[in-house]
Image: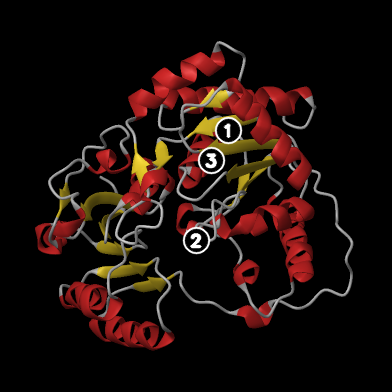
């Protein structure tokens, strides 16, 4: 008999699929349902098809009432397609409280709503946990500008642009390394990673009151502190945003996070996720060179995301410019690159995930930095 709380995700879309795919990392929770507004086109479909990956055995529903009697907790999650918090999300939170269901808030919401929810949940004797609270006051400026050396092997997960399965990559690496018996410390590219047992991307990196120099120093010190306290075999760092500006509208955060983190920490292994196009082998060589001269390190292998950017609709406000392809289609394409000795993977393929981890272990073991278990 499981002691885990049964969980429903709302509002569910492509942003939440990695949580479902790697729900085993949620030690205290078992995701049993996903709810999505009808207009998003996901209702009645298997949740795994949302990112064109493998089926997960959970059908997306359009109403919380279809799950509420059979769950203990609702995760309110960030979604790519935004809902109005006051008129659409907050009422669902109130219904959960009325039904004596716990709330785990993974969204960044206004402080006034945060306080109201705490009071209402306390009065109803239900649990409310939030991962949205920001407190920049505890980040003190650093007078020194030296970088301290990280002795533990560091694995970077980064991407050409946003929405390229980077979080999926981070969770897949974590799950497989842990299953192999390695002790893994991790900084994820999202703000709710603690619920999966590792550190969220730090708040000070988004701060407007912390200088860019201070951010580099603080990130370096954060990684060193994690190394000293947790004593891991490896540290995985997920980098938000992208590395390349598409145009004036699609900037991919200008590659700023990638540059700052590259100055704070020197990686021992780099996984680079890229969009799908009908690439030639020279494309990967070009990306490797751009990354080396812009950030100062080599790319060890690539993930070919099942995402294509619709350049023809560029400038259209109504269109979603990121289109998803089937995972099996990507499998066929990467075979050509592997025949030319290019390390390209499809993270939505379990065999590829295993091969990627084997590649990481082989390289780091060759350096004498990671003991083979």
How packed mark 2 is, by other alpha carbons closer than 10 Å (few <14, some 14-19, many 20 or more), is: few
Mark 3 or 2: the one toward you = 2
Residue 50 placement (x, y as % from top left): 28, 43
Given residues 304 and 94, the one toward you in this image is 304
> Which residue is label 2 attached to?
249
Locate the N terminus by quadrant. Answer: top left
Q: Secondary structure at mark 2?
A: loop
Residue 238 placement (x, y as % from top left): 59, 49
- Counting residues from the start of the chain, the first of labels 3 and 2 encountered is 3
Q: Secondary structure at mark 1?
A: loop
- Counting residues from the start of the chain, the first of labels 2 and 1 encountered is 1
Instruction: Please tell me whether residue 129 is drawn above or below residue 332 in the rendered image.
Output: below
How packed mark 1 is, by other alpha carbons closer than 10 Å (few <14, some 14-19, many 20 or more), is: few
Q: Is residue 202 left or right of residue 231?
A: left
Q: Quadrant of residue 315?
A: bottom left
Q: How far apart, in angstroms, are the residues tagged by discs 3 and 1?
A: 11 Å
> Which residue is label 3 attached to?
174
Q: Secondary structure at mark 3?
A: helix
Camera sees residue 97: no
> Which residue is label 1 attached to?
181
Q: Is residue 227 left or right of residue 70?
A: right
């Amino acid at each position: 008999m499981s002691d885990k709380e049964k969980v429903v995700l709302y509002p569910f879309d492509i942003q939440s699929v990695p949580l479902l795919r790697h729900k085993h990392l949620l030690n205290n929770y078992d995701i049993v349902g996903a709810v999505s507004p009808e207009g998003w086109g996901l209702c009645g479909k298997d949740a795994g098809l949302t990112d064109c990956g493998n089926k997960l055995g959970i059908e997306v529903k359009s109403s919380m009432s279809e799950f509420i009697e059979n769950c203990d907790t609702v995760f309110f999650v960030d979604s790519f397609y935004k809902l109005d918090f006051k008129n659409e999300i907050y009422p669902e939170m109130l219904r959960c409280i009325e039904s004596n269901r716990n709330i785990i808030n993974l969204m960044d919401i206004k402080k006034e709503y945060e306080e109201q929810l705490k009071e209402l949940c306390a009065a109803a004797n239900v649990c409310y946990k939030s991962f949205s609270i920001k407190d920049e006051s505890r980040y003190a400026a650093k007078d020194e500008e030296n970088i301290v050396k990280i002795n533990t092997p560091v694995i970077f997960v980064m991407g050409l642009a946003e929405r390229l399965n980077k979080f999926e990559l981070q969770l897949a690496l974590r799950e497989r390394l842990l299953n192999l018996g390695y002790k893994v410390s991790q900084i994820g590219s999202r703000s709710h990673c603690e619920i999966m047992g590792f550190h969220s991307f730090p708040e000070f990196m988004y701060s407007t009151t912390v200088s860019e120099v201070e951010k580099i120093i603080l990130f370096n010190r954060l990684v060193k502190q994690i190394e000293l306290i947790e004593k891991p075999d490896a540290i995985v760092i997920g980098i938000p945003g992208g590395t390349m500006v598409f145009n004036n509208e699609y900037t991919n955060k200008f590659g700023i996070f990638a540059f700052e983190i590259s100055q704070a920490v020197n990686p021992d292994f780099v996984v680079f996720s890229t969009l799908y196009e009908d690439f030639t082998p020279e494309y990967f060589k070009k990306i490797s060179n751009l990354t080396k001269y812009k950030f100062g390190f080599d790319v060890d292998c690539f993930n070919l995301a099942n995402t294509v950017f619709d350049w023809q609709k560029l400038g259209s406000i109504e269109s979603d410019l990121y289109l998803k392809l089937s995972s099996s289609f990507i499998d066929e394409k990467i075979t050509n690159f592997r025949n030319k000795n290019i390390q390209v993977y499809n993270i939505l393929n379990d065999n590829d995930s295993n091969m990627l981890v084997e590649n990481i272990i082989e390289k780091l073991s060759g350096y004498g930095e990671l003991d083979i278990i």
